[in-house]
Image (spheres, helix red, strand yellow):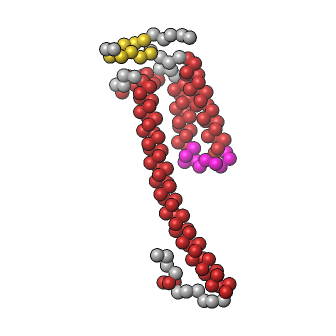
Amino acid sequence: MTVLPAVTVLPAVTVLAAASARLHFVTAVAGVLALLAILRLVRRRQLRAKYALLWLVVGIAFLVLGASPGLLDWAAKRLGVAYAPDLLFLVGTVFLVLVVMHLSWELSRLEDRTKVLAEEVALMRTELRAHTEGTPPKAAEDRRPA
């Protein structure tokens, strides 16, 4: 096991100067695997294009972070973050909160649409039943959903 040199950032706070080459390799491989999985889902039409683009960006970010070891340290230094992995956790948390908010919005929209469709189907069934039984359908104002 290789021990990396420690750098003192603040008094009594030390961080490793850089992550190991093995970690960068694993991150790059995870990025490639994520990209392949996303492309496979899109090709099978199991993932819509608007979501695929989002996850392709995530896969590319993993690939870039794995391929360029100093990029996260450079970004953390430019933003004034003392410990580079904290920046990664912050960005990841914000990203996941935004994804959850978007999916909640989509869910609400789809629930409303499902309710309207269910009401329309109920009206059509009523009309079909009335038509097959030979009774005239009710007036339009009597059929409006509550």
Residue sitting nearer the eye, 37 or 57: 37
Q: Residue 48's spot in the image, x, y percent?
A: 59, 49
Can residue 80 be seen?
A: yes
Residue sitting nearer the eye, 102 or 115: 115
Q: Residue at left 48%, top 44%?
A: 99
Can residue 75 be seen?
A: no
Q: Residue at left 56%, top 26%?
A: 27
Q: Residue 22's spot in the image, x, y percent?
A: 57, 18
Which residue is most to the bottom? 135
Would you identify the image quadrant in which residue 79 lies?
top left
Please tell me whether residue 117 is drawn above or below residue 141 in the rendered image: above
Q: What count of labels does the image hold?
A: 0
Horizontal side of 8 relative to 134 (left or right) equals left
Which residue is most to the left? 11
Q: Residue at left 44%, top 15%?
A: 17
Instruction: Give the residues in magenta.
Output: 43-52
Quarter of the picture holding the N terminus: top right
Residue sitting nearer the eye, 127 or 48: 127
Horizontal side of 88 relative to 10 (left or right) equals right
Asked if the magenta segment contains residue 97, the reply would be no
Please tell me whether residue 127 is drawn above or below residue 67 in the rendered image: below
Would you identify the image quadrant in which residue 23 lies?
top right
Q: Residue at left 59%, top 30%?
A: 30
Q: Residue 62's spot in the image, x, y percent?
A: 54, 30
Q: Residue 55's spot in the image, x, y percent?
A: 55, 40
Horizontal side of 104 relative to 136 (left or right) equals left
